[in-house]
Amino acid sequence: MIKEHEIQFAGERLLLNNRRSIYWPDKQMLIFSDIHLGKAAHFRQNGIAIPGNVIKKDLKALKELILHYNATVVTVVGDFFHAGINSDTQFFSEWAHSLPQLHWNIVKGNHDKSVNAENTDGIFYMNDSLFIEPITLVHHPEPEQSHTISGHIHPGVILRASCGKALKIACFLVSENRIILPAFSQFTGLDTGFLKKSIEKYTPYVVLDEGVIRV
Amino acid sequence: MLLNNRYNSEIKNNLKKHFTTSDGYRIINEWMHNKSMVPFSYQEKTWKSYAHGHSGMVVAPTGFGKTFSVFLAVLIDFMNRPEKYPRGLKLLWITPLRSLSKDIARAMQMAIDEIGLDWTVGLRNGDVSQAEKQRQNRNMPDVLVITPESLHLLLSQKAKTRFFKNLKCIAVDEWHELLGSKRGVMVELAIAHLRGIASDARVWGLTATIGNLDQALEVLVPRDDQRKKIVAKEKKKTEILSVFPDELEILPWAGHMGSKMVNKILPIIAKSKTTLIFTNTRAQAETWYMNLLEADPALAGQIAIHHSSIDAELRIWIEENIASGYLKAVVSTSSLDLGVDFKPVDTVIQIGSSKGIARFLQRAGRSGHSPFETSRIYFVPTHSLELIEAAALKEAHKLNSVENREPLFLSFDVLVQFMVTLAVGEGFYPDKLKKEVKSTFAFSQMTDEEWAQALSYITTGGSSLQNYEEFHKVVRQEDGLHKVTSRRVAMLHRMNMGAIVSDRMMRVKFYSGGYIGMIEEYFITRLQKGDAFLLAGRVLELVKVKESDALVKLSKKKNARAVSYMGGRMPLTSWLSHFLRKKVSGSLQAPPREKELRFLRPLLDHQHEFSHIPSENEFLVEMIENKYGNHLFFYPFEGRLVHEVMAALIAWRISQMYAVSFSMAMNDYGFELVSETPLQIGKQDLESILSKENLFRDVISSINATEMARRKFRDIAVISGLVIQNFPSVQHKFKNLQASSNLIFKVLEEHVPDHFLIRQAYTEVFNSQIEEARLREAFNRIANSRIIFRKTERFTPLSFPIKVDSMRQSLSSEDLISRIERMKQTMKRQKKTRKKLQSL
């Protein structure tokens, strides 16, 4: 079940959901980050046996979200590709053709260097950042700008029970000026140290099956 | 040289009858005689047995010339039948320890030169220069002293067959150290493969005494009918002395007796030539080193601290200065358990429990090293109950009882690594390789299906039915040869071979320059700037972290943390626990010579008066209800690991009777369950709670097996090549291949739940983490015991140390959501406290 938590950000109503993405109802826009397409295939090319269905599962989840919200625009805040073009990304191209009415905005991330419109069938145009009044979408969280939505970090928190057991869980980080998205792909790690080191005051919203919970 | 040039069956027969008149034997005997040495009878037996073409294993205590048993056997045989030894590598000497190999090679070369042969001895390990390795590749020495890892690297070379085709003997030194570990499995696989290249090579193991010698021999030489076990009659004399505190505490607890016992140690150091002081953890070593210097500042410069986090160069310096007699004492961890002989060491001190008999005696053997000296070891308890352990160790030593080393089965991570290793080099044909692999002890039970899984894991990535798209590792060529063709794959594999997986380490350096040592990354990440910690006998303060360097400065802070080490908590072996139960059982009737038990008399009386001292056919359960909580204490004396599982199991069984949650704590003697609510348990319930019925169904319900398997998978992922730890430093593009073992575990569990490496992780949990066999045995024993149930309000001498132990684990029968709610509450509380602290 898709469950949401509504927040006000830059005067806009945003829905943080438990599928690691944000829906912006006013723009009919689904926002997510760090799907790292082709990561599993890249591992396989280098002799690391990661099963092929990882990407299928990520894309299935994505399609569910698009249909659930009836979104017309999808914005990816960077690290759309993991390491260039391979069989996983080709699989994605075919998948994307099944949703022709959808408009894609893709913000460049550090992993997207070697990818451009020419080698992606011309489907995707990459932006360094994107401004959609009143919010800037950019891969790295930039302290100078106000009201940004970013990715890159793969934020997570460690929840510690009184018994000493610990769970690592992906989360959104939200401050007055910034939102950092969790990584969309299941095949990504978590940075639990970022929150501790950051000077900015973030509130983590953890992503659980039961919903998005503020901690 | 006097050598027979003709070889025929007549001579062979003569040899059998007249080995002692053969040229080789005569020459070796003369050489020994000139050095005023007389061969031990077990050495002569080895020589003879080798001459008859047998493989086998030599069992002798350290210091009794094990090396010369097998090494000289090869020389004698060569001198008697030189035509059987063509040019090239003849003897491969596998040793687990890099530090030992230099001395062994030197001793061998000296013997060869003195005897007048023209053989050369080479070294091959991580310390050997690239130039030297290339020289060897062109022209192999006659004898090569090598580590298991370097041997596998040699097997990954394209000229492998040329290196080994004339090999006559594979010797495995310190086999007891390798057996039971994945490095041991590496050795098994390598031997099977080498015998496929050099079919007449003999295999000889050298080992110290362990409990399962016959099995150790079978693992090493699995297929030969004519394998010989040769056991030295000579025994090492060992003196075990307990150090008693001035006064006995009726309620003992761990970790605070240090400073008092230091004053007992100082005179021992003073009257000895050189003393090795063994602790169980680096943290303990650091603390005791500090304590010693504080108690006697004059020791500065005469004592040192040695453990795995200390800079390697400094460690070598320390080792050299123990050998030269310059250092008076060295505080160390297991880092000095093995290694070169230190002649001046005449005294060993063991601080706290050694957790096992073999380890205790091994450490004792580091003193009085020459055959006819006595090893002297002092046992210093860290709390008074540990004195029972000293009594147990003495008894075990008297009865010559030491632990088994349980061999590993079906370590598929090691197998797939080995297969890729061969594919990187000359390549392999699956049918031939399968035969070799199945000939090892570790994989003798491997099914055809499992072999197929391993093979498709490295060729297609997935199962034999399904190809992983774009997977590229080992390629099957037209004639069926399996090879690695990608240079990237080959390079990454070579850089990541081996079966020792260590945590990610950080270099600790002075801010002003100067290297101190290495520490686990997770320890540093827990520190804040300005926090103080102990390392290499210094109090250091973290200044900043820069990439993989932790920059520090000297600190005057008092409350420094000692470097903690997750793997440091070794459990008590079942051997030692057996003797421990025996000693506790008879403690009230102890004869006067059992000084430890006499000393503990007041404590034992107290236990007896307020509760009970369990005899061997009794099982004690104490219920203690007081203002600290409602406790149940159980005393299986089975070691911490088994207690962890038992505690979770018992808590789960009680929670099935009525809703209750417990927190748990344990030590090597027993465990406690604590509840905030009054206990609704009586003596009549204990039998079902402690029942052996449905044991494993209940264990699986009570523990988090997935979490345990995830932890086991860490090593498996690295060894099998799913997680790459070492990357070529300059090439940034490899960074895209980083993933944690947790992530891979999650992905595989979800998409390929029956993956053979995931299954291996669960198997390892059951075999080594839960110690299935031992747990079953413990419950059988309890079932056959009388259960003694005692209720008191005060802690007893047995329960108190557990109560003080801080480790807590909890289990509740509530569901996950409320658990998360509670976690949140805890987090809030933590945050509030943090905030309060900040506002102060």
Image (cartoon, coloured by chain):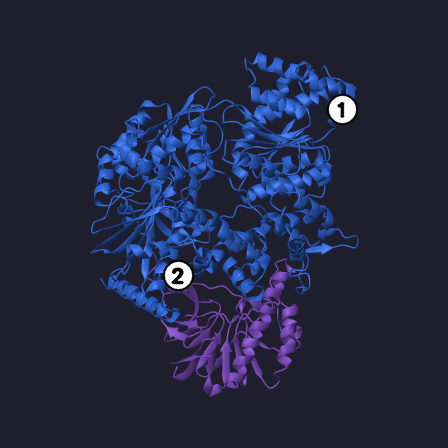
Chain colours: A purple, B blue
Position of the C terminus of chain B, as image quadrant, is bottom left
Q: Identify the amino acid type marked 1.
A: Glu
Kind of residue at badge 2: Ala
Q: Is residue B612 left or right of residue B743?
A: left
Residue B99: percent from left, percent from top = 52, 33
Q: Position of residue B265 (x, y in %)?
A: 30, 30
Q: Which residue is mark 2?
A: A166
Which residue is pictured at 37% across the width and 59% down the height?
B653
The chain holding disc 2 is: A
Residue closer to the observer: B182 or A146: B182
Above or below, B825 relative to B171: below
- The reply to whether residue B586 is in sight is yes
Q: Is residue B530 left or right of residue B65?
A: left
Q: Position of residue A191 (x, y in %)?
A: 45, 63
Q: In whole angstroms, how far apart are the C-alphas of marks 1 and 2? A: 66 Å
For the residue pair B144 and B590, the one nearer the viewer reads as B590
The residue depicted at 31 percent of the width and 38 percent of the height is B290
Q: Quadrant of the N terminus of chain B?
A: top right
**Label 2 residue SS:** strand
Mark 2 Cα within 10 Å, few/some/many (few <14, many 20+)? few
Is the residue B222 above or below the residue A97 in the image?
above
Can marks 1 and 2 be said to lie on one chain? no
Which disc is residue B83 wearing? 1
Question: Given the image, what chain letter belongs to the residue carrying mark 1?
Answer: B
Against B259, residue A125 (above or below) is below
| Camera-nearest residue between B230 and A210 | B230
Mark 1 burial class by Cα count in 10 Å: few <14, some 14-19, many 20+: some
Please state the horizontal and vertical placement of residue B602, each as a whole percent of the image. Answer: 22, 36
Relative height, residue B244 to residue B690 (above, below):
above
